[in-house]
C-alpha cells in the first residue's frame, strides 16, 4: 500500500511551497487509495511555536486535505530515538565523539587553508584513549568510507554520491537530543512510508538518511525531490512574491479549490489542461510525472483561476464564504440576482464583497472625477424625468427596468450614455459596477428613486 507524508516544522507558518509538497504527497496517496500521514517535526524546542503548529493544522483543514491516523509529534518520541542510538552504539555502528570546540576550530582552519571542504575527519571513530575532561560527547554514526551511496530519485533520476563525501555525522547532540537526519529516517521507516516527496533542498540529506536506514536495517522508501517554486523573474520566491502564510490566501479572498489547482500546475501537468477538479487531480496525478525544472509563481494565473471558481461556485457556497468578508445574504430574497450581477467581475472574495456592498450600501459621497463627467449639461433634468418614468412604470423585472431606460433614450433623443453615466453615479457613487438594469432590479423602485433624488440634490 502507498504511504506518503508531510512533515513540517512548527517554527513558522505553512507557506505555499510547503502546501504544494503536501498536495503532491496527498494526491499520490489518494490516487493509489493509500494513506497520507502528517508528522510535526518539533524537536527544536527553542524555536517551536504552538501558534505555528495550530496554523499548519488550520491550513490543512481549510484546503480540505485530510490526513490518516493521528498526527505524529517527534517531541513525544525521544525515548524511541534514544533506543535506536543505544542500539547503534552497542553494535559498534556509532560512537561517542569527544571533539572539543577548540579542536573543531583548528581542524576547520587547517582545511580552509588547504582549500578543502570543511568536514569532520573521523578522529574519534575508533578512539580508545582517555577523553578530555569537561567535554560532553556527541554521538556520531559510522558512515561508509568506501564505495558509493546511490538511489533512484523519482524526479531527478539516478543519484550517486561518493561515500567519502558523507562524513560521520552527528546523530545525537551533547545534551542527548537527536538530530534531524537521524529522526527523519527512523520516523519515515517506522511510519511505513513507501514514498517520500519533498523539496529538492533535501536532496543531499538523502545520502545521510540512507546511512541511517542501512545501519538499522530499515526499509528505504522511494524518494521524489521536487524543484523549488521561483518568483515571476525566476528567482527565489519571497514573501513579497507570494511565499506567505497559506491562511493569508484565505484572508485575501482566494478559494481553496483555486489555490490547490494553481499549486498542482506548479511542477506537474496533464497535456494543456489548466483547470482540474479535486477528483481529476486525484485520478490523474502520479509523482513520476513531476517536472524536473523549477516553476514560476504567476499571480495573474492564480487570479484567473480564482475568478473561474468564484463564477462556478453555487449561490449557497458563496453566501457561506462571504460571511467572512462582512456580507450576509442569508435572508436576502434577491441574493441570487445580486451574486449573478457581481461575481462575473470579481477575481477574489474581497472584490466580490466590495461589489455587493457597492450596490447594497447607498453612496454617501460621489467620486469627483465621475461627477464632473456625468453630472453636467442636462443630467439633472434627465435624471428627474427618469425617476418620474420609474414611478409610473413600477418595473418588477430586470428587463422592465431596461425598457424604461430605452424609453427615455428614445423620447429625449439622447445617446445611452446621457442617462447611463449620471444614473450609475447616482446609484453607486462612481462609474464602476454591474449592469444598471440588474442594479435597479436589486434595489427596487423606491430605493432607486431615493438615490436618484439624493444625487439630483447634490448637483449645483
Image: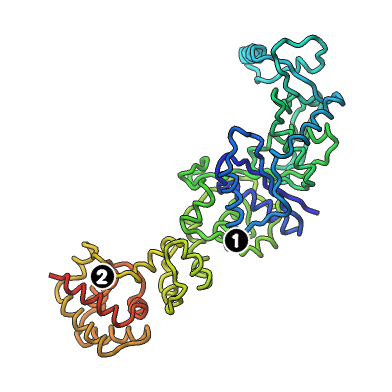
- Tell me residue 341's x, y (percent): 41, 74
- Tell me residue 9's x, y (percent): 62, 40
Q: Do tag 1 and tag 2 residues touch (Cβ < 8 Å)?
A: no
- Secondary element under disc 2, as helix, strand or loop, is helix
Q: Nearer the viewer, residue 185 or 199?
A: 185
Q: Nearer the viewer, residue 44 or 341?
A: 44
- Tell me residue 308's x, y (percent): 51, 66
In the rendered structure, the answer to whether residue 278 lies left or right of residue 399 reads right
Q: Nearer the viewer, residue 95 or 340?
A: 95
Which residue is rendered at x = 32% and y = 67% of the image? 432
Can residue 176 be seen?
Answer: yes
Give the class, few, some or many, for how many residues have Cα within 10 Å of label 1's Cα (few <14, many ≥20). few
- Secondary element under disc 1, as helix, strand or loop, is loop
In the rendered structure, the answer to whether residue 62 lies left or right of residue 430 reads right
Colour convention of the picture: rainbow
Which quarter of the image is occupied by the N terminus? bottom right
Q: Does residue 115 lie above or below 197 as drawn?
A: above
Q: Does residue 436 lie above or below 106 as drawn?
A: below
The quarter of the displayed image where residue 113 is located = top right
Which residue is rendered at x = 68% and y = 43% of the image? 225
- Residue 365: assigned label: none
CA gap between label 1 and label 2 equals: 43 Å
Which quarter of the image is occupied by the C terminus? bottom left
Q: Which residue is tagged 2?
A: 425
Residue occupying the far left of the picture: 460
The quarter of the displayed image where residue 177 is located = top right
Give the class, few, some or many, for how many residues have Cα within 10 Å of label 2's Cα (few <14, many ≥20). many
Which residue is rendered at x = 52% and y = 65% of the image? 309
- Tell me residue 240's x, y (percent): 45, 44
Q: Which residue is tagged 1?
A: 272
Q: Does residue 457 lie above or below 149 as drawn?
A: below
Amino acid at each position: 500500500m502507498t504511504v506518503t507524508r508531510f512533515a513540517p516544522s512548527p517554527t513558522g507558518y505553512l507557506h505555499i511551497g510547503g502546501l504544494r509538497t503536501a498536495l503532491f504527497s496527498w494526491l499520490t496517496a489518494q490516487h493509489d487509495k493509500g494513506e497520507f500521514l502528517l508528522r510535526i517535526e518539533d524537536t527544536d524546542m527553542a524555536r517551536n511555536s504552538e501558534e505555528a503548529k495550530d496554523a499548519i493544522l488550520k491550513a490543512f483543514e481549510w484546503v480540505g486535505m485530510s490526513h490518516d491516523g493521528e498526527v505524529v509529534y517527534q517531541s513525544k518520541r525521544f525515548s524511541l530515538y534514544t533506543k535506536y542510538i543505544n542500539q547503534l552504539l552497542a553494535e559498534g555502528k556509532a560512537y561517542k565523539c569527544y571533539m572539543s570546540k577548540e579542536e573543531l576550530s583548528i581542524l576547520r582552519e587547517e582545511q580552509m587553508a588547504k582549500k578543502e571542504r570543511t568536514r569532520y575527519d573521523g578522529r574519534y571513530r575508533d578512539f580508545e584513549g582517555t577523553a578530555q575532561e569537561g567535554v560532553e560527547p556527541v554521538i556520531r554514526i559510522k558512515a561508509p568510507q568506501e564505495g558509493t551511496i546511490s538511489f533512484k530519485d523519482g524526479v531527478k533520476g539516478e543519484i550517486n554520491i561518493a561515500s567519502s563525501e558523507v562524513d560521520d555525522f552527528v546523530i545525537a547532540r551533547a545534551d542527548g537530543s537527536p538530530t534531524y537526519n537521524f529522526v527523519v529516517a527512523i520516523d519515515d521507516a517506522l511510519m511505513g512510508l513507501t514514498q517520500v516527496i519533498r523539496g529538492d533542498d533535501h536532496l543531499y540529506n538523502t545520502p545521510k538518511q540512507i546511512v541511517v536506514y542501512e545501519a538499522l536495517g530499515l526499509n528505504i522508501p522511494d524518494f521524489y525531490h521536487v524543484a523549488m517554486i521561483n518568483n515571476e523573474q525566476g528567482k527565489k520566491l519571497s514573501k513579497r512574491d507570494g511565499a506567505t502564510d497559506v491562511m493569508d490566501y484565505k484572508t485575501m479572498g482566494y478559494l481553496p479549490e483555486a489555490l490547490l489547482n494553481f499549486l498542482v500546475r506548479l511542477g506537474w501537468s496533464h497535456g494543456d489542461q489548466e483547470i482540474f477538479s479535486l477528483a481529476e487531480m486525484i485520478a490523474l496525478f502520479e509523482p513520476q510525472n513531476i517536472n524536473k525544472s523549477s516553476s514560476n509563481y504567476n499571480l495573474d494565473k492564480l487570479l484567473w483561476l480564482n475568478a473561474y471558481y468564484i463564477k462556478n461556485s453555487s449561490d449557497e457556497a458563496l453566501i457561506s464564504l462571504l460571511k467572512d468578508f462582512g456580507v450576509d445574504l442569508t435572508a436576502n430574497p434577491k441574493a441570487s440576482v445580486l451574486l449573478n450581477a457581481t461575481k462575473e467581475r470579481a477575481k477574489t472574495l474581497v472584490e466580490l464583497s466590495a461589489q455587493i456592498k457597492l450596490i447594497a450600501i447607498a453612496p454617501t459621497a460621489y467620486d469627483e472625477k465621475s461627477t464632473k463627467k456625468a453630472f453636467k449639461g442636462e443630467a439633472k433634468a434627465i435624471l428627474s424625468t427618469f425617476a418620474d418614468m420609474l414611478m409610473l412604470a413600477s418595473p418588477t423585472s430586470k428587463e422592465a427596468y431596461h425598457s424604461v431606460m430605452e424609453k427615455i433614450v428614445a423620447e429625449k433623443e439622447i445617446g445611452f450614455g446621457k442617462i447611463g453615466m449620471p444614473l450609475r453615479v447616482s446609484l453607486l457613487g462612481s462609474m464602476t459596477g454591474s449592469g444598471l438594469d440588474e442594479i435597479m432590479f436589486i434595489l427596487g423602485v423606491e430605493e432607486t428613486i431615493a438615490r436618484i433624488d439624493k444625487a439630483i440634490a447634490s448637483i449645483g
